[in-house]
Image (cartoon, helix red, strand yellow):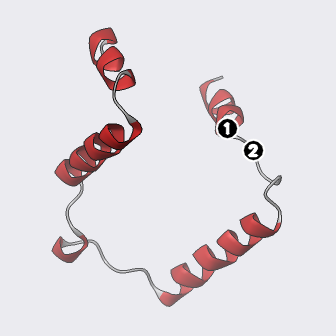
């Protein structure tokens, strides 16, 4: 959990600064794709594309993040 002072500092950042911080944190915890993560298989690519098309065709389908989160924490 973030401390209140860190949360406040993050909230004060511009969107671009928040994205820069996100990228810096992501890069510090996830290795680059060429250092160990396998590429997607053709089956995985096909499934991701199918899901993207399905989401684009019916943007009202599914649940919002707040609905999913509420279900997970109850």
Please say if the residues under marks 2 and 1 sit with CB atoms less than 8 Å apart.
Answer: yes
Mark 2 → mark 1, Cα distance in angstroms: 7 Å
Question: For this view, does 67 lie left or right of residue 39?
Answer: right
Image vertical order of residue 51 relative to residue 65, above or below: below
| In-front residue for pair 51/36 | 51
Q: Secondary structure at mark 1?
A: helix
Q: Which residue is labeled 1 in the image?
A: 68
Disc 1 residue crowd, few under 14, some 14–19, many 20+, Cα 10 Å: few
In this view, 16 is above or below 37: above
Q: Label 2: how many residues lie within 10 Å, few (<14), some (14-19) or many (20+)? A: few
Quarter of the figure with the C terminus: top right
Drawn side of residue 4 relative to residue 25, left or right:
right
* Residue that carries the numbered disc 2 in the rendered image: 63
> Which x, y percent locates residue 35?
16, 72
**Residue at 50% across, 89% down:** 42
Label 2 or label 1, whichever comes before in sequence order: 2
Secondary structure, mark 2, is loop
Quadrant in the picture for residue 15: top left
Q: Is residue 5 above or below residue 29?
A: above
Q: Is residue 41 above or below residue 72?
A: below
Residue shown at 25% from the left, 72% from the top:
33
């Amino acid at each position: 959990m973030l401390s209140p002072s860190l949360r406040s500092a993050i909230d004060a950042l511009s969107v671009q600064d928040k994205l820069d911080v996100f990228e810096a944190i992501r890069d510090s915890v996830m290795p680059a794709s060429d250092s160990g993560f396998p590429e997607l298989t053709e089956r995985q690519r096909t499934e991701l594309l199918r899901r993207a098309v399905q989401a684009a065709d019916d943007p009202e389908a599914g649940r919002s993040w707040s609905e999913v989160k509420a279900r997970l924490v109850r």
